[in-house]
Structures are given as structure tokens and as C-alpha cells.
Amino acid sequence: GAGTYGGASSTAGATGATGTRKMDEEEERDAVFYRLEMLGYRVGQGLAERFSRDRPRFNDTLDIIKFLCKDLWIAVFRKQVDNLRTNHRGVYVLTDNTFRPLQRMSTEAGGQAVTRAQPFLWFPCGVVRGALAAMGIHATVHAESTELPSAIFQIKTIPGSTQQ
Amino acid sequence: MSSNRAARLGEEIWKTRIDKVSAELVTLTYGTIVAQLCKDFDNDYIEVNKQLDRMGYNIGLRLIEDFLAKSNTMKRCSNFRETAEMIAKVGFKIFLNITPMVTNWTNDNKQFSLVFEENPLADFVELPDDGRAQDELWFSNIFCGVLRGALEMVQMQVEAHFISDILRGNDTTEMRVSLIRYIDDELPPEDD
């Protein structure tokens, strides 16, 4: 939980200024999220390699996205993505209504469950970005939950990035 | 509980009460964590071993509760030999679907080895080729911490460390587990 970040802002504590300390906590939290995302990225790369090894070459981006929503999602999260939408200009929105990593989460009433679940989406975000990268699609990936245990992933492919 | 009964129990729980997760996901995630630790600590593998052990310890403290909940038909182990059977045939079975071999007991029944013929953590793994990792890094060291943490919660203080690893080029992957003492001052009053 958020409590773990507080104790580590040692340098800011010495200055005593609340503003500085808060800033550092935020920075530190961002650093943790960045780390989780990067760990996920590496895992995603490995997963994509592993699970796409024996299948035919992909035809286009949509083909890859479908592979992500179906094969990879089943391998990693034990079910398919429930809904896939695209604007046909490089944006894909994946909705998973019962996202496995969030399935058993709950808090007391008013416990801001959705906010507290958000950090758990960074790793999967990285997994998705890493898997796409391994298949030649460079993208930014953003994930959020509006109601537990659903999760929505927004993938924006980066135009002009290399297809391999 | 006899060795056979433990094996049957482990099999039964694995089949009926365990939510499964992709082995590749576990393997790749663990490998990524170890790689990140190596980076964080500038390839100070002794420190990486310590960190893995500590992470395992924190997992073990909590995992024992899940273990007891899932194997709720069990009674307390009556001796350390029985504990070893439980760890290998129920614990490792239900959480990782492997059954390490319990062997190399000392005469006082306080030390044994777990020999891992399979190790899902080490699939697709190669140690860094820097001439040191092969001698210093215990890749699966998280297991040692898990055992230490889990057993501490059921009144056993143990010490666990690897003495060989196939990843290092050894013939086997073997962990030594030693009972230091039973922590009896924390036993609930109604216990014998």
C-alpha cells in the first residue's frame, strides 16, 4: 500500500519542508511504477516469444492485437479479452471485465478500492507493451480500472515505428 | 503421516483446490526479478542471494496460512521427518507442481536435503557469464527464504541454503535444511 513509500524519503525529511517531502514521495512512487512497468516489459517480451514461436507469421497489426487479446491473454490471465475496439488509426482499447489480477481485491466500503488497485496495473501494462514490442509494434499502453475487477487497456501505436 | 499419504494429499489438493497460473509467467517473472536485482546491486551476487532470501521469507510468512487453509485435513507434524515430507510432497506440490526428493538425513534427524529434479524457476535460465555468477549466485535462493518464513510461523526455526545447482554446472540442485530449534514458548496453551 501507499504506506510503504513514506518511510523512504530520507533526504527530504531533513529539510523539514512538507512541500519537498510530498514531492519526493510522489517521485518515489513514480519510480516504483516505472520499475514495475519495466519488469512487466521484459516478461511480456519473453511471453510473446514463447507463445508465438509455432504460429504463422502475422499479416498486420490487427492480427497481432488479436493474438494478444486471445492467445496471450489466455496464457497469462486465463481468459480472453472481452471486448476489443479500434479507431482504425492506431488506437486499440481492450476491455477485460474480470481481470484476473484484480479478481480477489476488495476493501471496506469507501476504501477507494479502484484507486488502490491502480498500482497493480503497471506490471500488466508493461507485459502488454513488451509483448507488442517483441512482435514489432511500438506503442504506449495505459491501463485503468473504473470498477473492480474490470480493467481497460488503451494501446496507442507509435506511427512510423519500425515493423520487424 | 506416511510419505505415500502425503503424496496423495498433495496430488488431491493440487487437482481440486488450486488456482493455476501459467508456468511461463512465473518463470519469466522470477527471472526478471533476479535480473533486476543483479542490476540494482551491481552484480554483487552475495547481496542478491540475501535479497532473494529476504523476499522469500516475507512470502513464507504469509504463504503458510494459505498452505494450512488448503490442506485443512492435516494434523500437526509429529517430528521433523514428517515436516520434510509435508514440505516436499504437499507444499512444493500444491504451489509449484513439483516434488523435490527428501534425502541425506543426518543421524539426529535434524538435517535433510531437498533435491530438485525439476525447478520451474530455472527454466530457460542461464547465469551471467562473468566468471563469478557461477560461483556466487544461488539463483533459486527465494526457496530458502520461503521455507524459513513458513516454518517460523509454525514454531520451527530452520536454516536453509543451497549447496549445488544445475545452473552452476553441478549434477544436482540440492538444498540443505537444518532444524535449529522448536520455538515452543509461542505454542498456544492448549497444545501439548
Image (cartoon, coloured by chain):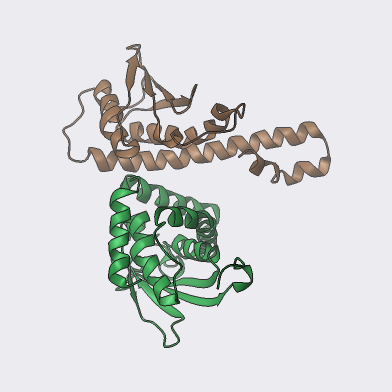
Residue B87: image x %, image y %? 40, 66
In the image shown, does B67 or A129 lie closer to the viewer?
B67
Task: Look at the image and tell me whether residue A40 can be seen.
Answer: yes
Residue located at (46% from left, 25% from top): A142
Residue located at (31% from left, 36% from top): A78
Q: Image check: B38 left or right of B17?
A: right
Furthest residue in direction right, as rendered:
A16
Q: Image check: B108 left or right of A60?
A: right
Relative vertical location of residue B83 with respect to residue B52 in this rendering, above or below = below
In the image shown, does B189 or B164 lie closer to the viewer?
B189
Q: Could you say which quadrant of the image residue B167 lies in? A: bottom left
Residue B28: image x %, image y %? 37, 48
Looking at the rendered structure, the number of numbered marks drawn on it comes to 0
Q: The C terminus of chain B lies in which quarter of the figure?
A: bottom right
Q: Could you say which quadrant of the image residue A6 lies in? A: top right
Furthest residue in direction front, as rendered:
B190
In the image shown, does B51 or A150 lie closer to the viewer?
A150
Relative vertical location of residue A133 with respect to residue B184 in this rendering, above or below = above
The picture's colour for chain B is green
Relative vertical location of residue A19 with respect to residue B166 in this rendering, above or below = above
From the rendered image, report the letter of the chain displayed in brown. Answer: A
Task: Look at the image and tell me whether residue B175 can be seen.
Answer: no
Residue located at (33% from left, 20% from top): A83
Residue A21: image x %, image y %? 75, 36
